[in-house]
Amino acid sequence: MSHDHFDRVAGAYDESLPAHVREHYRGKRVRFIERLLRRGSVLDVGCGTGELTVAVAARGYRVVGLDRSHGMLGVFQGRSGRRVVQGSSEALPFRSGSFDLVVTIATLHHVGGPDTVRAMLRDLVRVARSPGGVVLVWDHNPRNPYWPRLMKRLPQDQDGYRLVPLDEILDGLGRAGIRRTRVVRSGWVPDFAPRPLLGLFRSLEWLLERLPVIRTFGAHNVVVGVRDRETDRDVGR
């Protein structure tokens, strides 16, 4: 997808979902990151308007946000004075091993075809610390039947998208040398959940995320990969 499109929709991006639903998912992601990493440096690739980046930084992490869209980064800098970098997710402008955690949230479905996804995943792995650096990929689950309906209404998706299968993510991380991965299926609170009933929807989400078959249709595939010393040889090939 063209970053020019994101420049055009940047001003409306944060309002594309209700504030209480965005807050719910932002909280889930921050808590997940806290379980992965107690302290350290974080790179948020495809940070957009910076809602997650700012929330993670508020928990005491050293966070850098990166995005291709000048429009999105303009909104980000209007919200926070934190460091942001304009750049491509397939050629990250950082030295290898620079970050304890590299995270990308809801970006893969905007990247393009399998080759581009593979290139992006390889560079995410490259800039993660070795050994022990963590790569967190959190993206839309193609098996969830509601995504195509919702994405027709979201301005950021009007320029096209491709939902990336879980196997493609795992294959890309594997090709980059990641040998330790964990997969979590997450998210069942829809955009139409009323604020007064959010507690009920959260309770249902907690249950559905734990049902063996049902959870595979959750809103998001969450993949965690950990770098080891063997990864270095693969990344350097």
Image: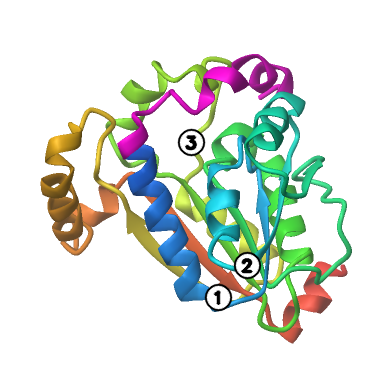
Counting from the top left corner in percent of width and height, residue 146 is at 28, 31
> Which residue in the structure is indicated by mark 3?
163
User: Is the C-beta separation of discs 1 and 3 under 8 Å?
Assistant: no
Using residue 82 as the reference point, say whether residue 147 is left or right of it.
Answer: left
Using residue 31 as the reference point, say whether residue 156 is left or right of it.
Answer: right
Magenta-colored span = 1-20
Q: Which dot, 1 or 2, sits closer to the camera? A: 2
Q: Amino acid at mark 2?
A: Tyr
Q: Amino acid at mark 3?
A: Leu
Residue 102 visible? The answer is yes
Of the numbered discs 2 and 3, the one sitting upstream in the chain is 2
28 or 139: nearer the eye? Answer: 28
Above or below — where is 182 with respect to 200?
A: below
Q: Secondary structure at mark 1?
A: loop
> Which residue in the structure is indicated by mark 2?
61
Q: Secondary structure at mark 2?
A: loop
